[in-house]
Image (tube, rainbow, N blue to C red):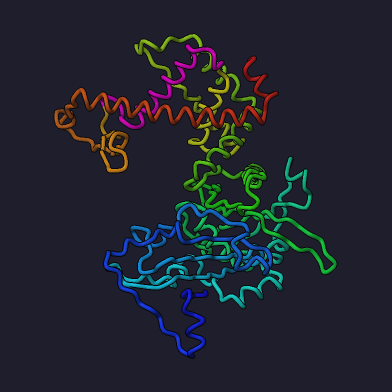
Amino acid sequence: MALKQKDTDAAATATGTKKRRRVFFSDTDAGVEANECMKVFLVWNPGEVSSVDCTAIQPFDLNHFFGEDGKIYGYKNLKINVWISAKSFHGYADVSFDETSDGGKGITDLKPVLQNIFGENLVEKEEFLHTFSKECEYIRTAVTNGSAIKHDGSYESDPAVEIVRVELQGAAAFLYSRLVPLVLLLVEGSTPIDIGEHGWEMLLVVKKATQEAGSKFELLGFAAVHNFYHYPESIRLRISQILVLPPYQGEGHGLGLLEAINYIAQSENIYDVTIESPSDYLQYVRSSIDCLRLLMFDPIKPALGAIVLSLKETNLSKRAQSLRMVPPADLMETVRQKLKINKKQFLRCWEILIFLSLDSQDHKSMDNFRACIYDRMKGEILGSASGTNRKRLLQMPTSFNKEASFAVYWTQEIEDEDEQTVEQQPEDLKTQEQQLNELVDIQIEEIAGVAKNVTSRCKDKMTELVVQ
């Protein structure tokens, strides 16, 4: 890591001494957010190092690495540039500033924070430049020790790209340790997995280039998955992390990883597949894939058709009756057994499939669909009128948004029915109703977004579904 103070280096060299100039400001130091002064770049050759005209990556939030307020104190005109090698995943940091000063908040020690993010990957410039002249043997070894996943539709357009499955040990474990900084920077809320725990695997998306000296592999993305026991004698597959390197995002590699995982689950008769805290976009891609798979799964058609018919013919506008859009229990079990889609995910996709089957111009059926979503969310959040243990929605004004902030909490079962009753004022009920409707609108918008993506990918199948 290079730490430089601007404008003073030349003078210090001429005199043979280095004196750090301290300036004392009269005003309290307001600090600078890490997001404003820190940039991270991905580079492929030595000529890109120390340049900002290369591939910049966009971390979801750098501030959270720097204390509660996300600010750096004690520097004037601070710039932190970090270059990460796309070949070895080593990093080099260049830190420059005009001067330092304790303006009442101290001077932030940058080195331990950067070490916390990049760990042993962070090296000095000379060593960093040297990494480009050496091939990363751990990538080659990890790929060589793994097995390629071949399934229908897997990278037919580019045979040089493949997905390789490896156990997370040896070279693969070392490779993962190199990738941890990118995971921390690009995957919100992520933490490194415990590679010492049994059952971890990686799926690597690699591009192979054949040269005279042999094959060379470039890593495009990866997924970390965990096999864990499910009583009495089966295995569940949990996706912990999926990351596609920024230059290769939007090329279908995340989609390919999810399809490969589904293929493994079905071919090895895994109990089901789950995802640990998926991002909104990952959930969007996953739901799109699963809806496409379900559209080609004949056992769902009778139950789906019955629900759609009920939405078309039933009148829920008067709210004297309710209709639950829940698939039969035996169908949920069949979907789990055959497609390895877990119950929660199937229920999410089920509502999307119903939406896809409705005519958007049929206001009656669309109003009924919304009423069902409303009833389902109301039951999940507020519970039934007879309720015991249930969730409640409570308005919680904050400085962020005083009108649209709320909290969800669980009530405890109380034997005395009178003690359970909480008198609500008309204004509270009105606010609660408004907030619930806002949540329903958000939910339907998400459903419509996935439905649109599914339609664009499978127009022929959609025509068949609507006709039925």
Q: Name the residue located 62 percent from the left edge and 68 percent from the top edge.
A: 49
Residue 227 in view here: no
Q: Is residue 36 left or right of residue 291?
A: left
Q: Name the residue located 56 percent from the left edge and 21 percent from the top edge.
A: 304
Up the image or down, 352 lies above or below 102; here it is: above
Q: Is residue 426 left or right of residue 340?
A: left
Q: Name the residue located 51 percent from the left edge and 52 percent from the top edge.
A: 187
Q: Residue lying furthest bottom in this view?
A: 16
Residue 354 in view here: yes
Q: Name the residue located 79 percent from the left edge and 49 percent from the top edge.
A: 159
Which corner quadrant holds the C terminus? top right
Instruction: Please provide percent x and percent y for residue 132.
Output: 68, 70
The verdict on residue 66 being magenta is no
The verdict on residue 377 being magenta is yes
Identify which residue, 4 or 291, lies in the foreground.
4
Count of numbered labels shown in the rendering: 0
Identify which residue, 343 or 396, lies in the foreground.
396
Instruction: Please provide percent x and percent y for residue 217.
Output: 73, 61
Q: Main secondary structure of the magenta part?
A: helix
Up the image or down, 464 lies above or below 145; here it is: above
Magenta range:
359-386
Q: Is residue 210 left or right of residue 407?
A: right
- In the figure, residue 317 lies in which quadrant? top left
Instruction: Please provide percent x and percent y for residue 87.
Output: 66, 65
Identify which residue, 95 or 367, lies in the foreground.
95
Instruction: Please provide percent x and percent y for residue 323.
Output: 42, 17
